[in-house]
Image (tube, coloured by chain):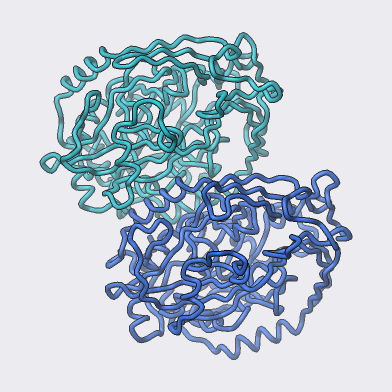
Chain colours: A blue, B cyan
Amino acid sequence: MADDSIVSWLTASQTALGPTADSLDWLTETAARTWMRTEKTSLEELDGWVVDADTGNLHHHTGRFFSVQGLSVRAPGATVPAWDQPIIDQPEIGILGILARDFDGVPHFLLQAKNEPGNPSGVQLSPTVQATRSNYTRVHRGRSIPYLEYFQGALGAKVLVDTRQSEQGAWFFRKRNRNMVIEVGAEVEAIDGFRWFTLGELAELLTVPDLVNMDARTVLACLPSPAAGTGSGPLAAALRRSVDPWETGAVHTLAEVLSWITEVRTRTDVDTTLRPLAGLTDWLLTDGRIARPDRRYFSVVGVDVEAGGREVAAWSQPMLEPVGTGVVAFLVRDIGGVLHVLTHARTEPGYTDTTELAPTVQCVPETYDHLPRRPRFLDEVLSTRRVRFDNSFAEEGGRFLGARNRYLIAETDTELDPADPEYRWLTVGQLDQLLCHSFYVNIQARTLLLCLRTLL
Amino acid sequence: MADDSIVSWLTASQTALGPTADSLDWLTETAARTWMRTEKTSLEELDGWVVDADTGNLHHHTGRFFSVQGLSVRAPGATVPAWDQPIIDQPEIGILGILARDFDGVPHFLLQAKNEPGNPSGVQLSPTVQATRSNYTRVHRGRSIPYLEYFQGALGAKVLVDTRQSEQGAWFFRKRNRNMVIEVGAEVEAIDGFRWFTLGELAELLTVPDLVNMDARTVLACLPSPAAGTGSGPLAAALRRSVDPWETGAVHTLAEVLSWITEVRTRTDVDTTLRPLAGLTDWLLTDGRIARPDRRYFSVVGVDVEAGGREVAAWSQPMLEPVGTGVVAFLVRDIGGVLHVLTHARTEPGYTDTTELAPTVQCVPETYDHLPRRPRFLDEVLSTRRVRFDNSFAEEGGRFLGARNRYLIAETDTELDPADPEYRWLTVGQLDQLLCHSFYVNIQARTLLLCLRTLL
């Protein structure tokens, strides 16, 4: 349960609007001083990377960073009861950390302008620190990571957020990062390439396509909701009642929600086994990439990257390149004056704990063109005129090439059986409470929760 | 957070003392109508069980129940950085369920008198239902399981507890069971072999050696703490302030405790790999059992079981037979009028999520005789005169042969560095809140928490 004083402090940040034009100018300027070139190349000719002769798995010659392996999924009783796929294995727990600092009673958050090879349109706003365990535990051979020390000595510091959270369970095998927000004092200043933002400024920047990166979104989402923002009208009013940590007016108690999650996780029978990439059903290494003959879902490609600014760097790596743009949506409804979010219990093969709470809709619509049944609520999301948030964001540009989703929030009057096996109405306050713990709220739902708070 | 009305209802149960002599008579009578014989036999001649020719793993010829496999553990930087061991693999999630019913405002809990082959002294008090997934999903060839239907239709029923919890991470590989307490109405009566108990009665029965079984203890521990009991004196007073869900007077906030758990789980680098039993370092199948040449820790043995009462049954199975009796202890301290529990962040190779909160001390002292360093706080626990609870309980008699631990609660004045990497002072209310979620509080700490509440 969030401290009341933290919630009111965050509320001051949420209502502090900033000069958005200045922020965008700063970003453009910072971006102009750096460049990055990403060129596709054959996986078999990828500098520093090895296709294992026995398994076909892809790994770095040092064994570091990550590998691409095969995964067999068996889910008896599911719509698709068995499939194979490539998956990224990156067992290390990295740090995604944002520093917070009080300026005259208003908390500001330190973000950096950062490019990644998979970003669809260059520089994005990123956390203060994005560091893998290799980065922060081994002797570093290049520059040290700015601000890292504040997240490593976190014990005893003022910790606002510190929880491991999952990432895309369809593409990562049990990947989890430590999401942290640490409050620091006036001794900490923004160095070149970094800038302090209020939540109100970030709310405006969240309406710019592909600007706030996935890592910044997941960390900011783990903060408790502010009590209010600058919104007006019935939606903002219902949303303010929804962030109430006492769950006043919630359709279900949190105990009932937890029992439902326990039931789904007990009932869901998914067996996932890492296995050699070579010989996976439906996936082949041809033309220097790993893909299905029908080209569905995604492929694994190689890229050569060159980047420059103050220093020049060049490296090569495999990336996962998805097919199509996804649709990720919350349907929300005012129930008795309290806004409720239609939440889906979603199973993905790479989740640490089987099932997490996900958006109402999360799919790439065109991948269902050949199937008899479309995902529940997709057609409502695509046809509704009651859209309250609609923007495109990119997913992790360090691993995914041009991966974009359209994130939508729309109001609905849809009814739901209270005993529906797969969906529940939750308040924002309940999602906030679950976010204090690991592996309850998936990464797409975390982005939407952050966007929903901009409507406060 | 527990509902206030549930806490006051449980408090009525805690203060309702029962005729303990009658309960013990009932148990003796019920036990007299049944019998069970357990005889050790060679693993290689175990009826229905197979020693796999390639791997040496033990499994039932049907593939059901459980298997015994090998586990390699690599924990760089730990006191023992690498070892091999046999481990029980039972991936199915079973149900451990207790029915609750209101009698004139006082909740009663339905337990059964039940024998298991590994019990050190026969019949124990067990949950209403102990069912593996094989039991409850497949067509059952024998009797149906009484009361099972109340736990399968739990959605919509009055659910007091419903959470997956771990079991012994030293002996089970990622075993977890669904712990449930469901409230039912007056239509549910105790059939032969079952009886309703108040928490007050159970508090008295928890002072009888080896009487309340492990499964009943873990499920009852998951209930929120009552607000009071029949205790008097300063310890009871400090304990009543400790169960406060608002954490008044707690040394650390729950957010700080969660950050510490995140830090430990991120820092702890344990790699566990299932591998063939045959060829494990230090473990051999000789004389029909799997053991170390030095006979330390435990062995895996075979048993033939015959049981009778209304029906007669006979079966054979492997069991894990530990060496020695363990010591499991909470040191507790009144800090500013609020009782705090000295909690250890403990890593066991079979945990689903690396590390769980454990008792101050949890070990078999004699296994340290050959080692230079004894576990922290063990000597204080063994020498203190300030013991407030001291009783012996058996562990899961369906898998472990004669496994017993001495459970102790003792007061202390010990000081702890607030940034100690491995220990923290927690209130009972904080442990209650963590018990609403999976994999935070280990099974030994759950038993001690239940015992601690008897001092309320």
Viewer-closest of A287 and B81:
A287
User: Where is residue B107 drawn, in percent x and y?
Assistant: 19, 40
What residue is shown at x 52% (from left), y 31% (from top)?
B172
Q: Residue furthest left?
A: B104
Q: Position of residue A122 (x, y in %)?
A: 71, 78
| Residue B9 visible, this orientation | yes
Residue at 39% from the left image edge and 68% from the top image edge:
A428
Q: Is residue B412 visible?
A: no
Foreground: B417 or A322?
A322
Residue B160 vs B25, above or below: the answer is below
Q: Position of residue A323 (x, y in %)?
A: 68, 69
> Quadrant location of the C terminus of chain B?
top left
Report the front residue among B295 and B291: B291
Image coordinates for residue A142, horizontal then vertical, percent: 79, 62
Q: Quadrant of the N terminus of chain B?
A: bottom left
Q: Residue at x 37, y 51 (%)?
A: A259
* B432 on left or right of B348: left
